[in-house]
């Protein structure tokens, strides 16, 4: 995993039902739920042998649980951007 000192991360889609936009949902919780739900779907549906993505540091523990649920080993490495980590998911070999 490589890092880029000029990198930054942010949302690629606006959320309009969050508190900062006048909605009923806490911003950070909504973002985390959306991201972890999408991760769960990716690992369940596509079943990649190896997958790397950036995740928020606050979501590391939940991402580990998602990984375990789908039979993946999980590890993280820091990025150059505060609050974000590189997450690596590697499918465990089936035991015979």
Image: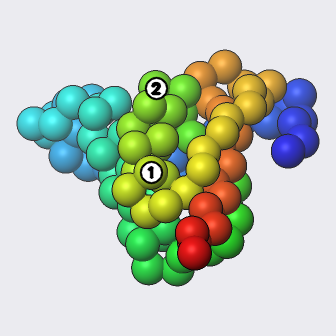
Q: Quadrant of residue 24?
A: top left
Mark linked to residue 42: none
C-beta proximity under 8 Å, tags 1 and 2: no
Q: Name the mark nearer the viewer: 1 or 2.
A: 1
Residue 85 drawn above or below residue 72: above
Regarding mark 1 in the picture, which secondary structure is present there? helix
Residue 91 drawn above or below residue 25: below
Regarding mark 2 in the picture, which secondary structure is present there? helix
Q: What residue would you read off at disc 1?
A: 68
Q: Residue at x 74, y 32 (%)?
A: 77
The x, y position of residue 78, in whole percent, is 74, 27
Q: How is the image coloured?
A: rainbow
The x, y position of residue 58, in whole percent, is 46, 26
* 47 vs 4, nearest the viewer: 47
The x, y position of residue 83, in whole percent, is 59, 23
Residue 49 drawn above or below residue 61: below
Alpha carbons under labels 1 and 2: distance apart: 18 Å
Marked residue nearer the N-terminal end (1 or 2): 2
Q: Residue at x 39, y 38 (%)?
A: 62
Q: Residues within 10 Å of mark 2 (few under 14, many from 20)?
A: few
* 18 vs 55, nearest the viewer: 55
Which quarter of the rendered picture does the C terminus lie within? bottom right
Residue 52 placement, left or right of 36 = right
* 85 vs 72, nearest the viewer: 72
Q: Residue at x 87, y 36 (%)?
A: 3
* 41 vs 24, nearest the viewer: 41
Residue 82 placement, left or right of 33 = right
Q: Residues within 10 Å of mark 1 (few under 14, many from 20)?
A: some
Q: Residue at x 63, y 30 (%)?
A: 84
Q: What residue would you read off at disc 2?
A: 58
Residue 28 placement, left or right of 9 = left
């Amino acid at each position: 995993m490589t890092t880029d000192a000029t990198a930054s991360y942010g949302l690629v889609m606006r959320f309009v039902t969050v508190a900062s936009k006048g909605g009923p949902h806490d911003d950070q919780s909504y973002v985390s739920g959306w991201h972890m739900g999408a991760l769960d779907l990716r690992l369940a549906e596509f079943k990649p042998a190896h997958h790397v993505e950036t995740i928020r540091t606050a979501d590391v523990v939940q991402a580990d649980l998602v990984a375990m649920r789908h039979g993946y080993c999980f590890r993280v490495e820091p990025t150059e951007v505060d609050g974000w980590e590189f997450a690596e998911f590697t499918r465990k070999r089936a035991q015979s």
